[in-house]
Image (cartoon, rainbow, N blue to C red):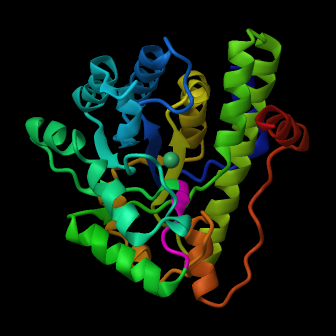
Amino acid sequence: MRAIHLLLLLSACACGAQDKRVVITIDDLPCANCAEGTWDQVTDDLLRTLKAHRVPAIGFVNESKLYRDGLLDSTRYQLLERWLQAGMELGNHTFAHLGATSTSAADYEQDVVHGEHHLRPLMERSGRELRYFRHPFLQAGATPQRRDSLNAMLAGHGYTIAPVTFDNDEYIYAYCYEQARRALDDSLMNRLARGYLMYMAQSVLFHGSQARDFFGREVPHILLIHANALNAAELDALLFWHEEQGYNFITLEEALKDTCYALPEATTRFGFSWIRRWQLAAGLQPPWPPEIEPDVQQLYDRLRR
Ligand SMILES: [Zn+2]
């Protein structure tokens, strides 16, 4: 709860009268960098929080994570069933989380097809259609030619691309948080959780204002976070903050109906927000988004070494 008060201090304007909408998209299912024995709890905590806030979220799956020692792990597979039972949608995030920038077109397509091996029948058995794709690392083709061929390949397999506007480096906080959790370091976990929520608030405010300046209106946003222990603990506060800001939670289908998602986007080898891609395509030089706190960045760099 302390974190929520900090967040409320960060911005006074709830601006509820405007059309503020956001899709919650959660990547790297069933669980991102989760310790053995925590996958169930992370999944249950995320789904309970999403349902409590009436969020029609979508989770993007890496099927490679369903395997242990080369064998399909039925308990991990069942975690995906829980997402569908909770009323959430699922999408393809490739089998092995390959980045398009450094992967050949043939290998990438194979990873996309491999990534729906269990997912497509699972969706169909629950009366749904597998329709959305999220690029790992948001690498959507580094050149116009590669982007166009990638788009054509994905469309050929029946996929609609899921862009991201509320992009962020949440994974840095999440990695440090997971290490602190494994070390049973409660004070570091609390410090990281508070920093995470402040950082996410700054990031959403930045991207919201960039989009408002660019379009001259509110557009429906798409937030990217991951299925990890940090969000299992802090998603409630994060969603609460969005509600305080006047955001309504919508489906990806509803968001993508907005004409902003038909705008041309600049190509990049990096994982930029789509807002930045639209700005670059329009010849603008947008400012960079808020950075991770220096001490957390240093902790991450040290832990990754
Ligand atoms: Zn991912």
Q: Quadrant of residue 297?
A: top right
Across and down, in percent, residue 103 comes to 49, 65
* Residue found 77% across the figure and 67% down from its top: 288
- x and y percentages locating residue 211 in the rendered image: 59, 70
Q: Report if residue 159 lies within the magenta region.
A: no
Q: Residue 73 placed where, x, y %?
A: 31, 21
Return the residue nearer the eye: 18 or 142. 142
- Residue 171 seen anywhere in this rendered image of the structure: yes
The reply to whether residue 8 is in sight is: no
Nearer-the-camera pick, 160 or 152: 152
Magenta-drawn stretch contains 138: yes
Q: Is residue 186 above or below residue 97?
A: above
Q: Examine the image and state in which quarter residue 43 appears.
A: top left
- Provide residue 212's location: percent of width, then percent of height: 60, 70
Q: Which residues are magenta?
A: 137-142
In this rendering, would 51 be left or right of 32? left
Q: Is residue 16 left or right of residue 117?
A: right
User: What is the quadrant of the C terminus in the image?
Assistant: top right
Examine the rendered structure and indicate whether residue 289 appears above or below residue 150. Answer: above
User: Which secondary structure type mostly characterizes the magenta part of the structure?
Assistant: loop
Which residue is rendered at x = 53% and y = 72% of the image?
217
Residue at the extreme bottom of the image, as rendered: 283
Q: Residue at 62% across / 80% down in the picture?
A: 279
